[in-house]
Image (cartoon, helix red, strand yellow):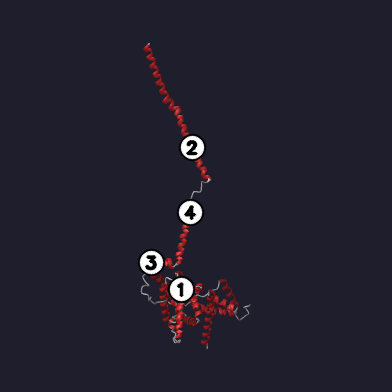
Amino acid sequence: MNLKSTKYNYLFQQYKNDIYHYSLYMLGNRFDAEDAVQDVLIKTWENINRFNMLSAKAWMIKTTHNQCLDLLRKRKRNLNNEVPIDESFEGNFINPNETDLNTIVDNKIITEQIKLKIKTLPDNLKSVFILYEIQGFKYREISKALDIPLNSVKVNLMRARKKLQEELKSYELQEVI
Amino acid sequence: MNYKKSSKVSEELLDRIISVAYGSASFLEKRRIEKLASENETIQELLNEYKNTANAAHSIQKEEYKGKLKIQTISDSNLSIFDDIYQILIGKPLVSAAATILLIFAITFSLFNNRELTYEGYTLAEVQKANYESKQALLIVNKIFSKTKKQLTEDILINEVSKPIKEGMNTVNKLFIKEKKNEI
């Protein structure tokens, strides 16, 4: 096994879940997310000697982000005829020790709603929110990965949090009505 | 602004509440907002709403990618020792950085230690001790020489040299006297 394969293997093992998870939220379904991951992995293989291993994480997320935006643009061109597939978001929220069924169901509903509402956020807010709140990236890493200033990361994150809350409130109102 | 009386919350305060709810504010800021929330129902309500959303968002777990690699030259299993070494040395720069720092520290430490071993002259105490010891040694030698001289002059020269010579001279003298008598 040569050095290129070793590097690639390491990056694949280390970041495959990150790029898949990010693609899943950005694109909204498993099939497109898997395609995006494969494209990113191929690009990684082709460019593996061109980027520094220390900034590999940022490079891969940046490539994933661009790949997702490309796919979203293509999708818009295809007359928005896609049917959303909710099965892509399987809930992992259930705690087996929890006995109160109502609480379990409520939590699951809230989490599923949040997942759905994250999907509806504008792309620039969604990307920052997913990377920071769900993937656990730091401000600086997001700034590097998405190629935007650090302050913009903070502003977009705050906007995303507010927007998400507004969306959830409007959902609650609809439920009441 | 008096937040106790006000039912409306400013944008700046809302940002602070959100930061606390999402856990990205400092400890002091958290205490301040919690204090405000305990005094104002609107703030408390907002804080709770955002906290619920934040908890739900943070509880979302990462989806695992189960797909295979399309690139056939690579297998994702049976990692070799070379892979492990690579992962430690290059893939994890913190480990290699820590090893480098440790190495530099060891080299520096050994250099300092060597410096301590280099000759920097004798101390006054050492000189005095050496002086005392050399004096003692010279005294011992002196004593031995004195004893030898005494033995040589008093014992050996008198008993072993002078006496036999004296006896020899007496014998020669006697022989001369005897010869003289015979001639007459």
Q: Secondary structure at mark 2?
A: helix
Above or below residue B38? Residue A171 is below
Quarter-of-image position of residue B184: top left
The N terminus of chain A sits in image quarter: bottom left
Residue denoted by label 4 = B113
Q: What residue occupies the far front of the structure in this picture?
A: A50
Q: Alpha carbon of mark 1 to alpha carbon of mark 3: how far?
A: 24 Å
Q: Amino acid at mark 1?
A: Trp
Q: Alpha carbon of mark 3 to alpha carbon of mark 2: how far?
A: 71 Å
Q: Amino acid at mark 4?
A: Asn
Residue denoted by label 2 = B138
Q: Nearer the viewer, residue A107 or A57?
A: A57
Contact, CB < 8 Å: mark 3 with mark 2?
Answer: no
Q: What residue occupies the far top of the structure in this picture?
A: B184
Q: Amino acid at mark 2?
A: Leu
Q: Residues within 10 Å of mark 4 (few under 14, many from 20)?
A: few
Q: Earlier in the sequence, mark 3 or mark 2?
A: 3
Nearer the viewer's eye, disc 4 or disc 3?
3
The verdict on a common chain for dots 4 and 3 is: yes
Q: Nearer the viewer, residue B23 or B80?
A: B80
Q: Earlier in the sequence, mark 4 or mark 3?
A: 3
Residue B104 placement (x, y as % from top left): 47, 59
Q: Alpha carbon of mark 4 to alpha carbon of mark 1: how far?
A: 46 Å
Residue denoted by label 1 = A59
Q: Earlier in the sequence, mark 4 or mark 2?
A: 4
Nearer the viewer's eye, disc 4 or disc 1?
1
Q: Secondary structure at mark 3?
A: helix
Contact, CB < 8 Å: mark 1 with mark 2?
Answer: no
